[in-house]
Amino acid sequence: MRRLTKKKALHLVKGLDAFPKVPDSYVETTASGGTVSLMAFTFMLILAFLEFFVYRETWMHYEYEVDKDFKSKLRLNVDITVAMKCQYIGADVLDLAETMVASDGLNYEPVRFVCLFVLGRTLQHIQERLREEHSLQHVLFKSLMKDSPSSLPPREDHPSAPQAACRIHGHLYVNKVAGNFHITVGKAIPHPRGHAHLAALVSHDSYNFSHRIDHLSFGEKLHGTINPLDGTEKISPDHNHMFQYFITIVPTKLNTYQIAADTHQYSVTERERPINHAAGSHGVSGIFMKYDISSLMVRVTEQHMPFWKFLVRLCGIVGGIFSTTGTDEGLPPVYSPAWLKPTLYVIFNPEPDVWSCDVSLDWQRCA
């Protein structure tokens, strides 16, 4: 009784088979079919291989939210070489609240303005990478400039060479409000309404604000990243000249498969003009970097294709190629005489004593 029940169940399950099988005796292998199968398997292998590379690729996902951290300090990292002696210039920060930030974290080092070959090649490489990529932040966040040095090479100034330039490097902690980092003639002194620079004792013939920005960034340093102003060099055509950089800082939370950190991106607009009071071009000679901090924060996350989606896409490739090639093979060759002959034979040459089946036409009649 149990066997009968089991057989009935198997018979019912067999009736639900949505993939009927053709008997092997009805299947004929041909050279054309083998060629199509070989091409299908080759094409399938190529697409699967390319799909694997797509699966390994990652992309950056950007989210925007309001930056609620306004009480913390912002770190300003600077490394600038100015073509003037250190005793003639001073650097400091004055923010929007008229607060003068102490410049104790900056070091003044007498150097040569012309950089040596190794440093020059490094800065040139940074500038080339800044200009060759259309969407640079996508490349930087993913790779963090793997082929770039983690820091600038050390300077190797010859002790006997004239050191008529000044390298200002170090870091400052500023308030998270708009401010102005500037380098101008004279040392800075505090003032009830802000601050002032003692420039009266410096001759105008000594003014030369040709400069090279080796590094300028905001936030904690991340090895392998570059910034828009890194490697920038400006030559002053005259003594009284003003260089202005208008910087917009965007707080950024970076979370990739390599690193997770809080950093800051920035964009910059450059402007320069001569100072000529007689011609109506007023101002103060020097280098002025006016920065403003965006109220929006960018959250950058590196994402990857899920494994289940990769399997679904792979199954789609395999199944699609199998279905397409199977359909092409099943189409009858309309203009082939080999197809017409068996058709005419079945119609005009009936033999009732012989049972056969024309598989190519799927006829189930006596022939």
Image (cartoon, helix red, strand yellow):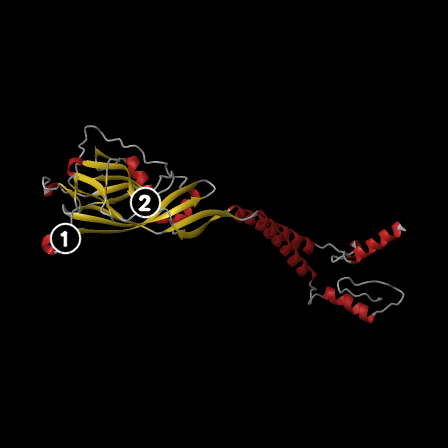
Could you tell me residue 128's position as x and y percent?
34, 45
For disc 1, the neighbor class at 10 Å (few under 14, some 14 to 19, many from 20) is: few
Q: Secondary structure at mark 1?
A: loop
In this picture, residue 100 sits left or right of residue 367: left
Q: Is residue 104 visible?
A: yes
Badge 1 amino acid: His
For disc 2, the neighbor class at 10 Å (few under 14, some 14 to 19, many from 20) is: some
Badge 2 amino acid: Gln
In this picture, residue 278 sits left or right of residue 316: left
Q: CA distance from mark 2 to mark 1?
A: 32 Å
Could you tell me residue 162's position as x and y percent?
17, 32
Q: Secondary structure at mark 2?
A: helix
In this picture, residue 249 sits left or right of residue 197: right
* Residue 127 badge: 2
Residue displayed at 88% across by 52% down: 4
Could you tell me residue 164's position as x and y percent?
17, 35
Could you tell me residue 200's position as x and y percent?
10, 42
2 or 1: mark nearer the eye: 1
* Residue 282 badge: 1
Q: Earlier in the sequence, mark 2 or mark 1?
A: 2
Q: Looking at the image, is 45 positioned above or below residue 214?
A: below
Residue displayed at 34% across by 36% down: 151
Depth check: 323 or 181 in front?
Answer: 181
Q: Is residue 83 visible?
A: no
Depth check: 120 or 298 in front?
Answer: 298
In this picture, residue 265 sits left or right of residue 195: right
